[in-house]
Every structure is written in C-alpha cells, then in structure tokens.
Amino acid sequence: MPKKLAVIGIGNTLRRDDGIGIVVLESLLKLYKREDIDYFNFGSASFDLLHRIKNYHNVLLIDGINAGFGVGELKINELKDIEYKLDSSFASTHEFNLKSIFEFSKKLGIKTKIYLAGIQVEDTSFGEGTSETLAQKKEDILKEIVKFIDKTFP
C-alpha cells in the first residue's frame, strides 16, 4: 500500500528565492517526520516527477511562484482548483511549470490528488540564499504548511 502523502520540494537553489521550495523541504525533513509521509527534492523538476507522484494518494508540491502576492505569502490549493490561474501571472519559475504538471497528470490518467504550496518569490536572479524578506518569513511558512498537513492528512 502506498504511503498517504508525498511532500515534494521544487526549486533551483542557485536562483535565490526560486530555491524556497527546497529550503522549506529541508527544514520539514529536520523538524517534521511522520511514517505516512515521504519527502523528495526534485530541484527544477522533470518528467520523473509525474512517475513518482502516481504512487501516492496525495502530493504536496512546495514551490516558489510569481503570482503578484506579497513576498513570502503562501497559498495552498489543490492544483485542479487553480488551473484557471496557471498562466504567466501564476507560474513556477522552472521550465517544467505547474501548468505542465497539471496537464500531463490529467493526460496520463494520474488519480493522485495534487496540492500546491505556492510561495511568492521576490528575487530569482542568479545567486545562493533567499532574499532577506523571504528568509524572515520562512518560519511562518513552515508553520502554515505543517498546520495544513496536520489538518488535511491527520
């Protein structure tokens, strides 16, 4: 029987805030372990992601987004519920974007329920480490994600 939840960090840690999905994932690995959760670092994502998610009932993708929200603002939604927003104004910063993940999972008949924890980025220029603004919000982001997991997947 597959585990109930996969938590997947997506991002490029060499593009400043774009790495926030990985930063949050690494913190969750240290602070929040449960038997029914597997954690994966998918970096800039790939088609392997789709093959991995089909083995889970639920997936939580953690990713930096550019949606015009306040820096560090977290929005968690089921991916199917934000389909209409998946254009250039609500996009991942990777070549394999959220819209692609959604469309390919539908075409492949993947039944996994996919959630997105989208974190508004500020600076995706080349460099290591998140912006100071985003770094200051990391603990609050972690608390919100843990609260979501506990409530949605008790």
Image: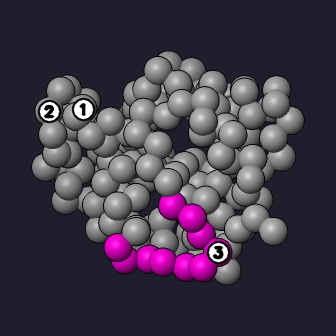
Q: Amino acid at mark 2?
A: Gly
Quadrant holding the C terminus: bottom right
Crowd band around label 1 with a 10 angstrom C-alpha radius: few (<14), some (14–19), many (20+):
some
N-term mark: 1 or 3: 1
Q: Residue at x 75, y 47 (%)?
A: 54
Q: How far separated are the C-alphas under marks 2 and 3?
A: 35 Å
Q: How far separated are the C-alphas under marks 1 and 3?
A: 31 Å
Is 50 on the left or on the right of 63, as rendered? right
Q: Amino acid at mark 3?
A: Asp
Residues under numbered marks 1 and 2 in contact, where contact means CB atoms less than 8 Å apart: yes
| Res 36 label | 3
- Judging by the rendered image, the residue that carries numbered circle 1 is 15
As drawn, 37 above or below 132: below
Q: Amino acid at mark 1?
A: Arg
> What is the x, y in percent for residue 33?
48, 78
Examine the rendering and report whether any part of residue 142 can be seen: yes
Q: How far separated are the C-alphas under marks 1 and 2?
A: 5 Å
> What is the x, y in percent for residue 24?
36, 58
N-term mark: 1 or 2: 1
> What is the x, y in percent for residue 1?
81, 68
Is 25 on the left or on the right of 59, as rendered? left
Q: Which residues are magenta?
A: 30-39
Q: Secondary structure at mark 3?
A: loop
- Judging by the rendered image, the residue that carries numbered circle 2 is 127
Q: Quarter of the image holding residue 107?
A: top right
Q: Residue at x 49, y 28 (%)?
A: 91
Is 39 on the left or on the right of 106, as rendered? left
Is 66 on the left or on the right of 123, as rendered? right
